[in-house]
Image (cartoon, rainbow, N blue to C red):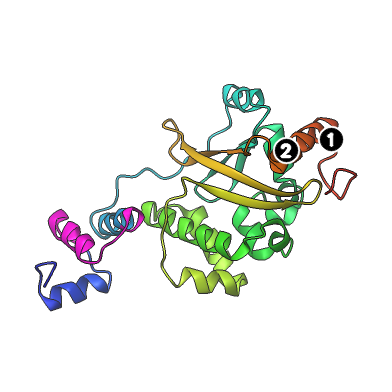
Amino acid sequence: MLTGVSVEYYARMERGDLGGVSVEVLDALARALKLDEAEIDHLNDLARAAGPPPRRRRPVEQAVKPTLQRFLDAVTGAPMWVRDRRLDFVAANPLGRALYAPMLDDPANQGNTARFTFLNPASRVFFPDWEENADDMVATLRTYAGQNPLDRKLTDLIGELVTRSDTFRYRWAKHNVRHHRAGIKRIHHPVVGDLELSYEAMEFPANPDWFMFAFTAEPGSPTEERLMLLGSLSVAGQTTGSGPGRR
């Protein structure tokens, strides 16, 4: 009633048959269900996927340009790293590599944060807020899958995680979505201990499949001190294990 459509029409939409549904109906549905921004975007992505073949290009593998790497390397006081929509590591500055060394140094993770989170027991120590982190990660993957259903590598990754991880499968079935733009990340690093970092996500207009994350610490906080220690150790190549900097 609130959406202004028949029960039969709404039931058809709820089953996923969104082909031919107008923008006006989608907007009315979003208002009636009080969807948030991420949910509205996902609804529109699903409607586009149900229509004619989407115009979104298939993801194209791109190499990291030297200019991008120089930019990352020029940032020395904050961890920065770039990932794609499959949550694959793309590039980072030295401090970013040092921060995520537990993930990057284990070849079983294949440089992928989702594999690390759901298939590697070490992630539950690395991420003290593991449950919340896992919820956000699955919701982000669900958002990306709705935006580009033609991404074969993304669907393969999701299929692998659904098959190998009960915790991922449970979360995937909930169909939650979210935007991953800013927040607080708590990390227990094996070298320098507990870190509480604010992060901001930035898009690449030239490559919409990549996102850059910058982490900062509250000035004068223990985290800032430990980041400085991690930075000095990364220069010396001592960012893994349980070295003397652990606190």
Q: Which mark is residue 58?
A: none
Q: Judge left or right: residue 111 versus residue 48.
A: right
Circle 2 SS class: helix
Place of residue 130 in the rendered image (x, y in percent of width and height, measured from the top left): 62, 62
> How many numbered marks appear?
2
Q: Residue at x 30, y 45 (%)?
A: 55
Which comes before the other along the chain, label 2 or label 1? 2
Q: Residue at x 61, y 71 (%)?
A: 165
Query: Residue 195: within the magenta?
Result: no
Q: In front of the other: label 2 or label 1?
A: 2
Place of residue 209 in the rendered image (x, y in percent of width and height, measured from the top left): 46, 41
Query: Residue 28: within the magenta?
Result: yes
Image quarter in which the N terminus is found = bottom left
Residue under numbered circle 1: 237
Q: Residue at x 85, y 39 (%)?
A: 238
Residue under numbered circle 2: 227
Q: Mainly helix, strand or loop, the magenta region?
A: helix
Whether residue 20 appears in this view of the structure is no
Hey, what amino acid is under mark 1?
Answer: Gly
Hey, what amino acid is under mark 2?
Answer: Leu
- Per the rendered image, the range of residues in magenta is 19-39
Outermost residue on the right side: it is: 244
Which sits in the foreground, 85 or 197?
A: 197
Which sits in the foreground, 212 or 12?
A: 212
Place of residue 201 in the rendered image (x, y in percent of width and height, measured from the top left): 50, 40
Q: Residues within 10 Å of mark 2 (few under 14, many from 20)?
A: many
Place of residue 216 in the rendered image (x, y in percent of width and height, measured from the top left): 61, 37
Determine the CA span between mark 2 and mark 1: 15 Å
Circle 1 SS class: loop
Whether residue 42 appears in this view of the structure is yes
